[in-house]
């Protein structure tokens, strides 16, 4: 696990102790591959091993042909890059100028090799009044929308529509960055207004979020993943490292305005601890998290959330959400919605009847969340190893 994190850093193979780490043994290489796949950084690490001239050792020792796998990943990445350009061109012909989001944008701005950052769909952000034009243009390009009922549900309660192509390509057309009921306030209009112009390697004009907005969105995506993906932290690290004009005061102001200070603080601290991301002294403290927020987030053991992927459990993910909320009033509102099932009600129409549950089921879920939160306190208050680790999370030291 430590090797997976170390090789995911920008220094990567330049500083990794190959000779003393056990890299030359089959069990080590098999474990490295398993952890890299689980944390969604296999392509990143294979590219790093190729740069360091070590990738052929995988085949000779563990039997895993890393070089062949990397060639496959590069072919897949090239296909997605071509499709991304095709989608941008078709939208441009329809008079729509979208902003690329997430992986499709990160490949153009934060990574040197497309295989480092794989993605399984093309996310584009368009103005709400251009949504139907964009969907129609994609349908003409052989993309198929979801069913009418599902699209209606998404239009009423979500923030993007999904279109699929027979070859396996997927496009998500966003008109917002979160549901209208979200306690956060990501400003899609600002993302559109302040987007930067770039050109893809294939020569297609593209627009991507400014680096500060990209960090805000990635922090929000971290919450959706339950802070269980190392890949998201690598994204943030690379965005910051590849933006020489990164505006830290603007990031702080926009995080506060969009009510995502907790998400940004937790994301940046994790990137700092795990990947050595350079964050200005005092910046995280300056985001103004309350003492209660900092204490409860630390007790959740954020490093463990990422590396052990505990945030994939619903109770853990909801506990993280609660303590990333900017104020007590919002926290109480979300707790009420969790208990009554109001947060999930629109989406339960898509679930089988036996999964929809009732008020008793919702209340039981809230009790489970409360029990999980309460279980954190003995370790923190009694001063055990996990308690000391949790209390030191916000400190100056780096792992």
Image (cartoon, rainbow, N blue to C red):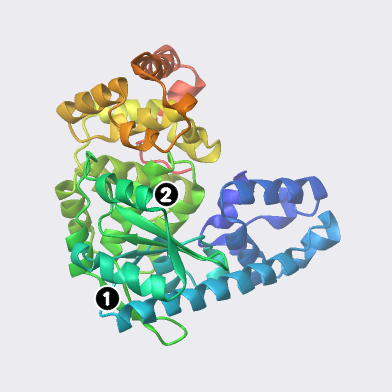
Q: Could you classify mark 2 by the number of other residues whose Cα lies within 10 Å: few (under 14), some (14-19), or many (20 or more)?
A: many
Q: Is residue 223 left or right of residue 312?
A: left
Query: Could you tell me how far apart the alpha carbons at marks 1 and 2 are, in whole angstroms?
Result: 32 Å
Give the residue at the far bottom of this rendering.
Answer: 203
Image point (74%, 55%), residue name: 19
Residue 248, x across and y down, in percent: 23, 58
Residue bearing the label numbered 1:
97
Q: In this orientation, does residue 54 appear? A: no
Q: Could you classify mark 1 by the number of other residues whose Cα lies within 10 Å: few (under 14), some (14-19), or many (20 or more)?
A: many
Of tags 1 and 2, the one toward the viewer is: 1
Q: Secondary structure at mark 1?
A: loop
Q: Quadrant of residue 364?
A: top left
Residue bearing the label numbered 2:
271
Q: In this orientation, does residue 119 appear? A: yes
Q: Quadrant of residue 70?
A: bottom right
Image point (69%, 51%), residue name: 33
Q: Quadrant of the N terminus?
A: top right
Image point (22%, 58%), residue name: 188
The reply to whether discs 1 and 2 touch (Cβ–Cβ < 8 Å) is no
């Amino acid at each position: 696990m430590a090797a997976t994190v170390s090789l995911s850093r920008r220094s990567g193979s330049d500083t990794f102790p190959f000779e003393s780490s056990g890299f030359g043994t089959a069990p080590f290489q098999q474990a490295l591959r398993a952890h890299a796949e689980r944390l969604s950084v296999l392509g990143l690490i294979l590219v790093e091993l190729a740069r360091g001239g070590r990738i052929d050792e995988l085949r000779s020792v563990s039997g895993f042909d890393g070089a062949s796998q990397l060639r496959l990943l590069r072919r897949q990445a090239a296909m997605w890059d071509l499709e991304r350009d095709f989608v941008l061109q078709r939208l441009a012909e329809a008079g729509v100028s979208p902003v690329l989001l997430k992986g499709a944008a990160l490949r153009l701005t934060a990574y040197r090799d497309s295989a480092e950052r794989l993605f399984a769909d093309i996310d584009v952000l368009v103005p709400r009044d251009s949504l139907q034009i964009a969907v129609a243009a994609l349908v003409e390009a052989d993309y198929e929308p979801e069913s009418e009922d599902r699209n209606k549900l998404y239009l009423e309660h979500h923030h993007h529509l999904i279109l699929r192509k027979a070859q396996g390509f997927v496009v998500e057309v966003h008109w917002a960055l979160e549901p209208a009921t979200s306690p956060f306030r990501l400003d899609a209009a600002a993302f559109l207004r302040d987007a930067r112009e770039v050109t893809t390697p294939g020569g297609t004009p593209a627009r991507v979020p400014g680096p500060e907005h990209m960090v805000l969105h990635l922090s929000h995506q971290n919450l959706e993943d339950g802070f269980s993906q190392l890949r998201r932290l690598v994204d943030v690290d690379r965005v910051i490292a590849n933006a020489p004009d990164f505006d830290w005061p603007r990031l702080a102001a926009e995080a506060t305005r969009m009510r995502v200070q907790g998400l940004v603080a937790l994301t940046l601290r994790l990137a700092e601890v795990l990947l050595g991301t350079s964050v200005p002294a005092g910046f995280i403290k300056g985001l103004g998290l309350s003492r209660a927020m900092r204490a409860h987030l630390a007790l959740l053991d954020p490093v463990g959330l990422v590396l052990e992927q505990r945030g994939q459990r619903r109770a853990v993910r909801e506990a993280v959400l609660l303590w990333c909320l900017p104020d007590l009033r919002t926290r109480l509102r979300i707790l009420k919605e969790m208990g009554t099932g109001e947060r999930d009600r629109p989406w339960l129409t898509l679930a089988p009847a036996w999964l929809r549950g009732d008020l008793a089921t919702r209340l039981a879920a809230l009790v489970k969340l409360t029990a999980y939160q309460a279980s954190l306190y003995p370790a923190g208050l009694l001063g055990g190893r996990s308690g000391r680790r949790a209390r030191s999370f916000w400190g100056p030291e780096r792992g």
